[in-house]
Amino acid sequence: MNVFPVARWFGLIGLVLTVAMGCATAPTQEMSDARQAIQAARDAGAEDHASQALGNAESLLSRAEQAIGGGRYDEARENAVASKKDAVKARNIALAIGDAAAVLDEADGLGFEWRDSQKILGRARAAAQAGDEGSAVKFANLAKRQGKAAIEQYYLEAAKVMLWEAEGRQGEMDAAQLGDYRAARTAYRNQEGRKAYELISGVMASLRAGRTDSHVVVRGDSLWAVSAKARIYDDPYQWPLIYQANSSRIRDPDLIYPGQGLTIRRSHSAAEVDAAVRHARTRGAWESGVVEETDLLYIGR
């Protein structure tokens, strides 16, 4: 009896059974991968920024679960793999749009957002709703780049004013301040706005700490305009600080006179500055001759 053909026949049967059993195994890993990918997409904000792709991923996972319940493991595996793919797409879209939106919000808060940036972000959102990952990510990244450029421009402008003031005060600087001043100038020349601003603002804060300056009112001045001057506070909303420091000589903060001398304090805490800005933003409209009750409350009268 020839045993070799028989052995080959049994070997072939074993191989077929092994493959069949492998295909019949529940897609446990694929299901786990899909669930994790969906959770990652949700964590990235896909419900807000990529609802179409996230919805597809969740629907495919549900179909995979139903297929497993019916013992259709091949169908379940196929749907689980497709679910993970859509979940990854949703996460990529959500991260791109979320990052762009955050950058544009920062630029808008600084008053330096470019005019068409929100339109570009809108195109990214529209592509996301259509499930077009490539276009959504492309437009979101473009909007983000514009937002970053706008932010840098804001800080370059702000740093420029302080660098101009610092140039004339180098003789007052110690070695550390002088080093930061020079580093700020280099950053400014390299168009690194935020870095230049952070360096020079630290230098100027140190130089201004504890100092009291003065300002003589000229025709056309107001507390708002004086506070906005670069050599004063460089911020019109800080005018209540001037009013508070000169409350003994200013009856109505809406009315000051040419030739009037004003004391400009430099040692305010962050809380005092915040309180002043908050008062300036919430008090009533400017009206000379009528003292606002909120102004009196602000200075504690």
Image (cartoon, helix red, strand yellow):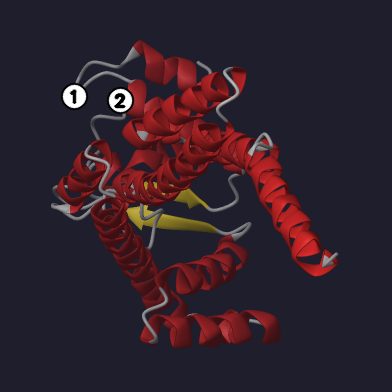
Q: Where is residue 281 in the image (x, y as percent from the top left)?
A: 34, 28
Q: What element carries label 2?
A: loop
In this rendering, position of residue 280 left or right of residue 146: right
In this rendering, position of residue 221 left or right of residue 81: left
Q: Which residue does the image show at 46% across and 45% down from the upper left?
A: 91
**Label 2 with label 1: CB-CB less than 8 Å:** yes
**Which residue is under mark 2?**
252
Q: Which residue does the image show at 53% across and 19% down from the upper left?
A: 66
For the residue pair 123 and 114, the one nearer the viewer reads as 123
Q: In which quarter of the image is residue 171?
A: bottom right
Q: Is residue 249 visible?
A: no
Q: Position of residue 192 (x, y in %)?
A: 42, 76
Q: Position of residue 283 (x, y in %)?
A: 33, 20
In this rendering, position of residue 263 left or right of residue 234: right
Q: How crowded is mark 2: few (under 14 residues within 10 Å), some or many (20 or more)?
A: some
Outermost residue toward the top in this view? 293
Three-letter code, disc 2: Asp
**Which residue is under mark 1?**
288
Gap between marks 2 and 1 measured at Cα: 7 Å
